[in-house]
Image (spheres, rainbow, N blue to C red):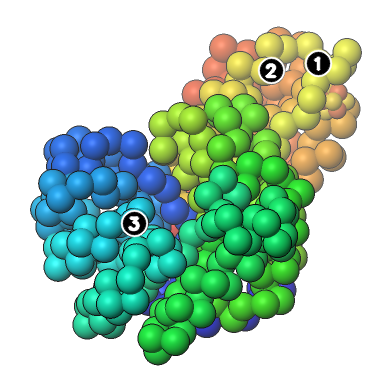
Amino acid sequence: MRKNTKEIKIGSLWIGGHHKIAIQSMTNTKTSDTDATIVQIHALEKAGCDIVRVAVLDEADAYAIQSIVKAIHIPLVADIHFDYRLALISLASGVQKLRINPGNIGSIERIREVVEACKLHQVPIRIGVNLGSLDCEIREQYGRTAMALVKSAEKHVRILEELDFHDIVISMKASDVPMTIEAYEIASRTFSYPLHIGVTETGTFFSGSIKSAVGLGSLLYQGIGDTLRVSLTDDPVQEVLVAQEIMASLGYFSKPTLISCPTCGRTQYNMIPIAKEIETFLQTLPHVSFKVAVMGCVVNGPGEAKDADIGVAGGKEEALLFKKGIAIRKIPQDKIVAVLKEEINKMIEKVVSK
Ligand code: SF4
């Protein structure tokens, strides 16, 4: 059961409430290099990214937003630290969400100026607190704890609420997985605003995917999280694909998925490269619920993968094609990938045209 949170609009996209959990990523190009940034955002859109964030470090980045928003099809978020003028330029340039911590902008006049501009442009603000940048007062009182993250977020939230601003999204990130989970659990009991969830600084593809799956998976399973980002030291497109996989494994996202056995002494064909190639192929297909099995043997394969729409179970240098657990025909080893792709394409076309 999703936790019910306040509905917030980012450009044309609604988040919170019972709206779909949105997948976010962040570009790693220099934002003012508009060509490179747009190319990367198009790749993210193609992969299924719902919201994209860009770092705004200087005026050139903030002004570049004007051309970027015109060329892309998903809402754009400007990530700004400290400099309220960059927030104002980004808003005037058409950005659809700000990630800025009001308590770090400076005087109340500056905060008010940014908040009034957000109201004018109907742009929400994400407060993003990070364990690495807690203010001294909170760190002294709560240490480096989950509660410190929540209290820090609360401090920024109060500033916005006192200015009668309520289009707020909250994130609290730490690289420690249990602490991140605990912070979001407390936050979901404390705030009614949507939560952007993520584990930060998780590392490269391998460790980052695992840490994110554990952290985000635990939260999503409890119904916590309205938008999410998997942070990887890798191509941002990989972040989107990993996020989809995490969400699909909990039933929050429909996509073709692979079921494959771990192989054992009964496997008598070269199965592992086939499973890998089919998994990559599935990433290119439309986002519909569809299960493909690549199994090691005919003894247990079709039975173990009974809920697969289609699959193969290996024999001696050949495989048996099955649909919904029913045997169809045998395929020689060198034709397995081609036949399977062709059959999957046919079945997916039918699902899409329904
Ligand atoms: S499906 Fe067959 S080959 Fe694969 S793990 Fe099970 S018994 Fe072994």
Q: Is mark 3 within 8 Å of ligand 1?
A: no
Relative side of 296 to 278, left or right: right
The answer to whether residue 123 is seen in the rendering is: no
Other-residue count near label 3 (Cα within 10 Å), few / some / many at <14 / 14–19 / ≥20: some
Between the C-alphas of marks 1 and 3, the distance is 59 Å
- Image vertical order of residue 7 relative to residue 353, above or below: below
For label 1, the residue is 267
Neighbourhood count class around disc 1 (C-alpha, 10 Å): few under 14, some 14–19, many 20 upward: some
What amino acid type should be assigned to the residue bearing mark 2?
A: Met
- Work out whether residue 246 or residue 197 is closer to the camera in this orientation and state it: 197
Q: Give the secondary structure at mark 3.
A: loop
Percent from the top left, x then y, of residue 271?
69, 17
Select label 2 or label 3 by which is in front. Answer: 3
Asked if the beta carbon under badge 2 is closer than 8 A to the nearest atom of ligand 1, the reply is: yes
Query: How many discs appear?
Result: 3
User: Whereabouts is ligand 1, in terms of quadrant?
Assistant: top right
- Marker disc for residue 109: none
Q: Is residue 328 above or below residue 297?
A: below
**Marks 2 and 3, how far apart at CA:** 54 Å
Label 2: state its secondary structure: helix
Residue at the location (78% across, 45% down)? 306
Q: Position of residue 159 (x, y in %)?
A: 45, 78
Mark 2 or 3, nearer chain start: 3
Is the C-beta separation of discs 1 and 2 under 8 Å? yes
Residue annotated with mark 3: 82
Task: Tell me the residue at 65%/55% (across/down).
Answer: 139
Per the model, the C-alpha gap separating discs 1 and 2 is 8 Å
**Residue pointed to by mark 2:** 271
Residue type of the residue flagged with mark 3: Phe
